[in-house]
Amino acid sequence: MRKIFKYLTHRMVIISLLILVQIGWLLAIFLHLTSYSQIISLGFRILSFVVVIYLIRRDDNPAVKMAWIVVILLFPLFGGLLYLYIGGKKPVRHMRRKLEKTLKESGEFLTFDDEIRETLAREDATAAGQVYYLEKQSGFPAYRDSAASYYPSGEECFEHMLDDLRRAKEFIYLEYFIIEEGIMWNSILNILEEKVKEGVDVRVMYDDVGCAFVLPSHYDKILMQKGIKCVVFNRYIPVFSTIFNNRDHRKILVIDHQVAYTGGINFADEYINEKQRFGYWKDNGIRLTGKAVHSMTMMFLQMWNTFSGDKIDYARFSSEDIPAADGRGLILPYSDHPLDSEFVGESVYLNLINNAIHYIYFLTPYLIIDNELATALILAAKRGVDVRIVTPGIPDKKMVFLETQSYYQQLVEGGVLIFQYRPGFLHSKVAVCDDRFATVGTINLDYRSLYFHFENGVYLYDCPAVMEIKKDVLNTLEDCTHITEELCKKNMFFRLIQGILRIFSPLL
């Protein structure tokens, strides 16, 4: 009973109820107006019809268009109005303007080496194309004088994080979707407190919704009392707004402008298997050294300067101050955000799939994809590419898992090999291709990651880490169940539920 009371009185629950009250109040006014006047009712129906025509003509994702058309057909009175309000899933205008200004300011402190692209164009046209796309659309350069270390588990990555944190002398910057009090975070926090006393500049940024049920309210004030500067991204407040749909799903740790980490790992005990909720938690991380760290630092600064009143001068950080790392290949950290119409995360995956010759393997916790990705995967398989996707065997969200499984039959029948990780939940976000290309980061194969969230990743070409990633995928496959066409065929009830979920998945 105490747990139920605590849940019902939680800040997020209360705010959600207040928002529902606002929605109910607006709906009541709307229904009253439409019932009061046939002309008003006809006007809204005409508006819905016009919106459907607009959607059909709009150059947009077909799955998103279909989902909205179904909603409008089901609710012709207010469906069109609903689309006009939340259809674009864009944040409010002032947020977009603030970030655009920050990106422009920070761009002056990012140096692009034309020689890298020109040399790459002669060596490997596929890699050159991906680098050209990422440099232009994400705004971060490619580096040769950098190195990457890949960690196939949260436990292994965490050990190296602690060692690097203990060596910090100048600053520690963290930006994470989830921070939860426990063994993992408390170990880090103890080091952060000590470093603050040593004069190290420590800054933490976390997502309000991601941490809502795992951190006390106003945890930022607790951190600031310890001398740690803190920003809470996109606070969840009791005002009906579409901005709440856009979350900071990134994972960035930068230390002294010398070392950077990213990957799937958040700061909570399940990520290092100190707590098991869904069997063994399979995750990954990557550690960067050398000039590529500069991009990771700038990524953090961009978000901090956009959403914090405490601006940091970009001029304090220069890639010239970073020693070159002894690493082979090319490394390009990149970011993606929902404020524009460019879906960088999805495009990176599509480019890899479309250019794959021998194989492409994915590790992803969710598989909720649009027609473009599904078609690309199937076409790759049909032209002889070994396409494999590994998803969890034990889900963290049952409804999302049903959506994921709804894509199995289409992909399997198209020649894609699907596997489920038997020991537990797989949270890694990885793609590796042809022993030459890989990407590691925070981007899932689902609509929220690909369209609605702030995300980041690292593109790797011809690096030793590429083969480490391939080895991790092959080792993971040994503990997987192969999904055959027989296993895809559930009873009619499950298939009906999955079909409904799949229609509306772009809107969830």
Image: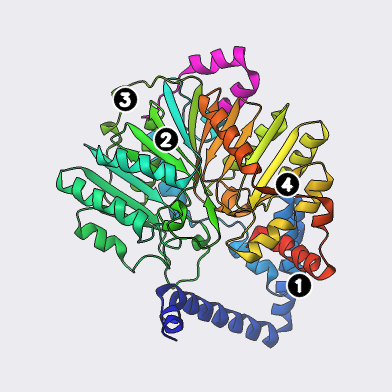
- Mark 3 or mark 4: which is in front? 4
Task: Compute the Cα span from label 1 to label 3.
Answer: 58 Å
Q: Image check: 353 left or right of 9?
A: right
Q: Residue at x 54, y 18 (%)?
A: 117
Screen quadrant of the N terminus? bottom left
130 within the magenta span: yes
Confirm or deny contact between disc 2 and disc 1 (CB under 8 A).
no
- Report the front residue among 220 and 81: 220
For label 3, the residue is 322
Q: Which mark sits nearer the N-terminus, 3 or 4? A: 3
For label 2, the residue is 287
Question: Residue flagged by tag 2: what amino acid is it?
Answer: Arg
How far across and how far down the image is residue 178, in percent? 43, 56
Q: Quadrant of residue 161?
A: top left
Q: Residue at x 43, y 26 (%)?
A: 147
Q: Secondary structure at mark 4?
A: strand
The boundaries of the magenta stretch are: 108-132
Q: Secondary structure at mark 3?
A: loop
Q: Which mark sits nearer the N-terminus, 1 or 3? A: 1
Q: Residue at x 36, y 29 (%)?
A: 109
Q: Quadrant of residue 230?
A: bottom left
Q: Indicate which disc residue 418 carries.
A: 4
- Mark 3 or mark 2: which is in front? 2
Q: Image check: 500 left or right of 21?
A: right
- Mark 1 or mark 3: which is in front? 3
434 within the magenta span: no
Task: Compute the Cα span from label 2 to label 1.
Answer: 49 Å
Q: Secondary structure at mark 1?
A: helix
